[in-house]
Image: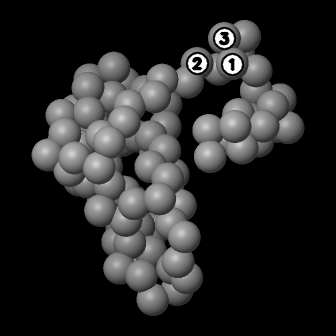
Amino acid sequence: MVAAFRKGLGETGFVERRNVMVEFRFAYNDNTRVTDLLADLVSRRVAVIVTPGSTSTALAAKAATMSIPVVFSVGTDSSGDRARHQFEPSEW
């Protein structure tokens, strides 16, 4: 997934360490770490938070900040997913 993320950045003109910096944080399936990891990113005032693969992490990111955009992906149909409804633009 990281390789695909980097490839997508490159395809849109972003080159790591040249015009974009990517910082990774991993909870390693330990949900107790997620809040601390997100707090660290928020304190660093990152431009965007990406939370691939986990609805609960995406919702935690939304709860951690109202000013930093959260980009998320999950491997299910999100049309009925509670995350999709939690991230409606009208709430921003």
**Crowd band around label 1 with a 10 angstrom C-alpha radius: few (<14), some (14–19), many (20+):** few
Secondary element at image label 1: loop
Residue at the (37%, 24%) spot, across then down: 45
Rendering colour mode = one colour
For the residue pair 8 and 42, the one nearer the viewer reads as: 8
* Spot occupied by residue 23 in the image (x, y as percentages of width and height): 48, 23
Side of 52 relative to 62 (left or right): right
Side of 32 relative to 34 (left or right): left
Q: How many marks?
A: 3
Which residue matches tag 1?
Answer: 16
Residue at the (76%, 41%) spot, across then down: 8
Side of 78 relative to 17 (left or right): left
* Callout 1 amino acid: Glu
Which numbered dot is residue 57? none
Residue 40 falls in image quadrant: top left
**Crowd band around label 3 with a 10 angstrom C-alpha radius: few (<14), some (14–19), many (20+):** few
For the C terminus, the quadrant is bottom left
Side of 85 relative to 7 (left or right): left
Secondary element at image label 2: loop
Which residue matches tag 3?
Answer: 17
Do the CB atoms of the residues marked 3 and 2 lie less than 8 Å apart?
yes
Query: Can residue 7 be seen in this snapshot?
Result: yes
Do the CB atoms of the residues marked 1 and 2 lie less than 8 Å apart?
yes
Residue at the (14%, 46%) spot, across then down: 32
Residue at the (49%, 44%) spot, across then down: 50
Which residue matches tag 2?
Answer: 21
* Spot occupied by residue 61 in the image (x, y as percentages of width and height): 31, 49
